[in-house]
Amino acid sequence: MAAWKKQNVFLLVFVLQFLSIHGAKILTICFIGGSHYLLMDQISRILHNNGHEVRMFLQFGEGMLPGYKPPPSPYQVTTYSLDEKYLQEFMDIFLENQKEFLKGRRGVQSVLTFLKELSYQCNITLHQSEIINFLKEEHYDIAVVDAFNPCTFLVSEKLGLPFIAFFPGIMANADRVGMPVPLSYVPLFQTQLSDQMDFFGRLKNTLMFLGSFVVQKMIDSTFDGVIEEHFPAESRPNIPDLHLKAELWLYNIDFTLEFPRPLLPHVQYIGGLLAKPVKPLSQELEDFISDSGDSGFIVVTLGSMLSSLPLMDFLKEMNDGLAKIQQKVIWRYQRSKWPQEVEIPPNVKIMDWLSQNDLLGHPKMRLLVTHGGMNSLLEAVYHGVPVLGIPLFGDQYENMARVKARQMGTFIPPEQLKADNFASTIQHVIENKSYKISAMKLQTIRRSQPFPPDQQLVRWVDHIIQSGGGGHLHPYSYKQPWYQQWLLDVLLFIFVSLAVVIYIIVTLFRALIRKLCSAGKLKRN
C-alpha cells in the first residue's frame, strides 16, 4: 500500500513537472529575412510541435526569400511590413553591397551601413504601438530572439520579457557573451585563422582582439538614437548589458566544423536544425539527374537572399566555368532575372528555388557550390558532401576557413573567380577523394552525437522555463566590474607591494652603505 502511494506521488510530481514545462507561451522574434527567417521558422515549429503555444513577431517584406513558397504555419504569426518606398531604397542599398562583395570589397563600413538600416527599421518597429501593446497583453513566458539583430533585444526589453538569444552563425560575439577567449588557439571573427596558429597568426589574432573593442563600440552606437527615443532616461538599456541579460545563448554551429573552445554553461551549440533525412525529389529533377550517369551532379546556390547575380562579368565567368565540367548542374537562380544574351549550358538547370537538403542527400550528389552560409555547410556535413565556397560577406569567409581546415573543401574569393579556375577547382574537389573522405568522417561525427539539435533546443528551452530563468548558469563575472574581471586591482596591488618592498630594500641598503662609509671615515681619522 505504501509502495502504491509512493508511486502515485511520483506520478503526480511528474505530471506537475510536465504541465509546468509544456504549454508555455513563447514569442519568437525575427526581423531579417533569408536564412534568419528559415531558422526562426524552424525553431518556432519545433517548439510548437512540442506542446508550446508559439507566436512569431515577424517583419515581412525585406526580400524575405525570393522564389520560396513556405508551407502553412502551424503557429501564430504577427506581421507588419515596412513602407514600400523605403523597402525599395533598402533593396537598392543591398544590391549595391552585393556588387561590392562580388568584387571582393568588404569592410567595417559596409557592416555599419547595414546596421544603421537595421536601426532605422527598429525605430519603425518600436513605433508599432498597437502591435507592441497587443503582445504585452498576451503575457508571454519567454521570448526566443534572432540575436544577430540588436533590435530583437530592445523589443524584448520593451515587452518586459526574459529572452533566449539564438545566434545564426559562429560565435562572433564571444567576448560580449562573457566567454573566455584564449587568443593562442581561439581564432577571432574576421581573422580567417584556424586554431593552429603560428607566431604571426597569434599576433594577428591579438591585434584583432584589441581592435574589436573600437569596432564594437561603433556598432553599438548605431542604436543609441533608438534607445534614447523609446526608453525613459532612468531605465535605458544598452546593447552590451542586453547581451549579458539573455537567459541562454544558443548558436547555430557544431563542433564538426567549429574549433574546440571553452564554453560557459549558458552557451550551447545546436547547429544543424535545417539538416534532416531526405524527401523524394520531383520526377522532373530525377529525370535530369538520371541523365548524369556516373559523373553525377552538383548544386550551385549563393544563399537564400542572393537569387541572382547583379554583375554581368561575374555571372558569365560562373556560367562559362559550369559549361566546362562533365557533371550536371542544378543552379538556384531567379529565371526572370537571367539575362537573355547569356546562353544557359546544356548541362545546367536553372531553378527559382530548390530543396537543397533533399538534393544533398541524393546518391549522385558530388559537390555543393555555396556562398558559405552556416545552414548550407551543416546540411553538407549531415549528408557527407564536399564543398566549394565562394564567400561574399559576413561570417562566410570564417565558415569557409573552417571547412578548409577540416579538409572538407576549399574556396575561391569572388574577385579571383574565372571560368577556368572555377571549372578546374570543381573537378579537383570532386576527383580528389580526400575531400569526400573528410566529409563522410564529419558526417559520422555529426550523426553519432547523443542528441539531435531539435531535442537540444526543446530540452534547453524547457529547462529555462522550468527553472524560472538561466541565472544559475551565468558566471559571477557578469556582476564584476571590468577591472576585477581582468584582475587589474590585483595586479595593481602586487605592483604597489613590490614597489614598496623594493623601495624599503633600496632605502635600507643605502642607509647601510652610508653607515659603513661613515664608520670607515671615522676609523681612518
Image (cartoon, grey):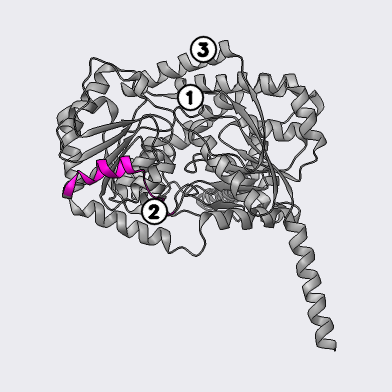
Region in magenta: 277-293
Contact, mark 3 vs mark 2 (Cβ under 8 Å): no
Question: In this image, 464 relative to 191: left or right?
Answer: right
Contact, mark 2 vs mark 1 (Cβ under 8 Å): no
**402 above or below 106?**
below
Where disc 2 sits, the SS reads: helix
Pointer 3: what residue?
A: 89
Q: Residue at x 79, y 31 (%)?
A: 134
Distance (Cα) linking label 3 and label 2: 38 Å
Where disc 1 sits, the SS reads: helix
Dot 1: few (<14), some (14–19), or many (≥20) neighbours within 10 Å? some
Q: Mark 2 or mark 1, which has the lower sequence index?
A: 1
Pointer 2: what residue?
A: 382
Amino acid under disc 2? Tyr
Q: Is residue 503 visible?
A: no
Q: Residue at x 58, y 13 (%)?
A: 84
Q: Residue at x 22, y 25 (%)?
A: 344
Q: Residue at x 44, y 38 (%)?
A: 189
Q: Mark 1 or mark 3, which has the lower sequence index?
A: 3
- Residue 27 placement (x, y as % from top left): 69, 40
- Residue 305 placement (x, y as % from top left): 44, 28
- Which of the two residues, 342 or 143, is positioned nearer the viewer here? 342
- Which of the two residues, 267 or 218, is positioned nearer the viewer here? 267
Which image quarter: residue 391?
top left
- Residue 111 placement (x, y as % from top left): 48, 24
Pointer 1: what residue?
A: 111
Dot 3: few (<14), some (14–19), or many (≥20) neighbours within 10 Å? few
